[in-house]
Image (cartoon, rainbow, N blue to C red):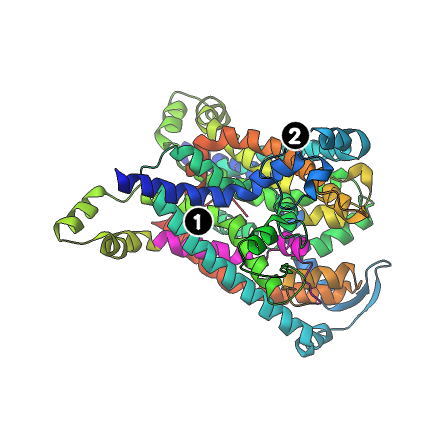
Amino acid sequence: MSRSPQALLERRYARLGLLLIAPTIVVFCAVIVYPLLAAIYLSLFQLYTPTLEGSFVGISNYRDLLARGEFWISLRNTLVWTAGTLSLQIVLGIGMALMLHQAVWFRSLARSLILFPYFVSTVVAVLVWRWLFNDLYGILNHMLIGSGAVDMPVDYLGSMPNAMISMILVGAWKYFPFVVIAVLARLQTIPDTLYEAARIDGAGPVARFFDVTLPQLRDVLVVIILLRAIWDFKEFDLIFLLTGGGPVISTQTLPLLVYKEAFALNQMGMAAAYAVVMMAIMLVFMVVYIRRTREKDAS
Amino acid sequence: MMRRLLFNLMVWSAVLIVAFPLFWMVVTSLKPQLELWARPPAFLPVEPTFEHYITLLRETNFLVYFRNSIFLSTATTLVVIGVATLGAYSLVRFTYRGRESLAMLVLFTYLLPSVVLILPLYLMMVQLGLANTLFSLVLAYTTFALPYALWLLRSFMAGIPQDLESAALVDGASRMGAFRDVIFPQLLPGIISTALFTFILSWNEYLFALVLVNSDESRPLTTGVMNMLISSFNIEWSLLMAASVMMSVPLIIAFAFLQKYLTRGFGAGAVKG
């Protein structure tokens, strides 16, 4: 049986394509797919971290976890943190993007300054904020006391609900630039004719925002909200460094719980079970996001 | 005119409030120790000093951490860009079974929480005897850097017109020849910005460094500087602020280069956080 040269070429191309993707697949299997499966496998064991000795316990880790108050508290904290910081990021991000879309003096300088919190390391951001929050010498307490808003220094991180509020605010400060840039990029592609038409119809600035801008932003906002929800849900660095989950466990989110269980309490198996459950919750958002991207890819 | 002035004032006050913590970081790093305890704090240092920077470089491990971070981020970026460029070329311009599923797997791993992967990776590094080495961190960093770079490069690659490659093929070039002569030059801006983003991600990483490295010789800046806070009895805020400023310098440089590509990168759904 003879093959056409065309078919032969196609086959050779397919083989070359596989060869080019091979290094990616090898790395993926070694550092992502294998650890992912291993995490699920680990969650069926009771395992002491320093010696790595343990025994198979089946699904009892999962049964324990659901019965523990700490899991539910951490889940609630994660949801409060995600909902709080995400909504602030969205509101502040859209507001700032609308402002920076207008003609402002030194606009590109303003844009760079806004972006900076996003690029700076979380370690740097947290150090700076802990210094601002310092009870005796921090500038925030100076300003609040000086303006007469409070009589006593505020304890920003050591008491509740202050710690959760501070954490949500710092999170919003650090991550809202992402929303600014994404929205700004979309704003630039809205045709002016839409605004002119609205103006002729007698729409004021507020009406133009709700009737023209917001509907145009809808698609990009859905993507931003999904992405940010996923990233805020799994945030570790900022919370761990800012409050460490404290006071006691009032700001402890699920990623912190996983870390604590594995490396402070040395229960690797239990930690894996927490991690798997956390991922299962995130999977909802991830699947929606991947669906959307795939549809966009296809069209 | 009045309205314009008011609008500008409003925008700039908002911008300055957002930028204030970073301004305060620089100011604090330049204040002599005594001025830190002044009430009310001076808005600008009365007698600016570089003593904290000198202490930082001379009396702490800062330079070791800095060198480690440079090595780590550069190595991660080189490995990841090399693998991801070939991978992205394959994902965009070749047809074979499973290609679409592979692309979706990349996207899935891009969203995966590090805290899930860290447990088995920790066990893996301990068993391989790689714990406490920079190499273990390079390996661990590929878990987030590779999906990220692949996804970003894939969108840059998709933006290159197919006709260019087809023309080269008709002229008798091989696929890899066409890649080298036609695609690569077109893709170069995309590769550079992806490399810079990858560098920034690795530079700022904290969790893997916290878990996998526990010795001062191989600690990168993030955990190293944080250690200076925890291990000191008296928190020296000016020293920490000086460290924060120094730690951000490479980011500012990368950022300056990125400006041009920023919107593009964001538009591609990139820039992780």
Where residue A40 appears, x then y in whole percent? 68, 63
What is the magenta range?
Answer: A219-248
Circle 1 Cα neighbour tier, 10 Å, few/some/many (<14 / 14–19 / ≥20): many
Inspect the image, locate mark 1, and give the three-letter code of the amino acid beneath it.
Answer: Val
Whether residue A239 is visible, yes or no, is yes
Tell me where residue B139 sits by quadrant.
Answer: top right
Q: Which residue is mark 1?
A: A179
Tell me where residue A258 sits by quadrant.
Answer: bottom right
In the rendered view, tell whether residue A248 sits above or below residue A230. Answer: below
Q: Which residue is mark 2?
A: B48
Instruction: Give the spatial CA distance, label 2 vs label 1.
Output: 36 Å
Taking depth in this image into account, of A238 and A137 the one nearest to the observer is A137
Overall secondary structure of the magenta section: helix
Residue at horizontal 66 percent and vertical 76 percent from the top: A66
Where residue A10 appears, x then y in whole percent? 44, 36
In the rendered view, tell whether residue A48 sits above or below residue A140. Answer: below
* Label 2 SS: loop
Taking depth in this image into account, of A188 and A62 the one nearest to the observer is A188
Taking depth in this image into account, of A27 and A62 the one nearest to the observer is A62
Residue at horizontal 49 percent and vertical 54 percent from the top: A228
The outermost residue toward the bottom is A67
Inspect the image, locate mark 2, and give the three-letter code of the amino acid beneath it.
Answer: Pro
Question: In the image, which is nearer the foreground, mark 2 or mark 1?
Answer: 2
In the rendered view, tell whether residue A292 sits above or below residue A105. Answer: below
Where residue B180 appears, x then y in whole percent? 50, 24
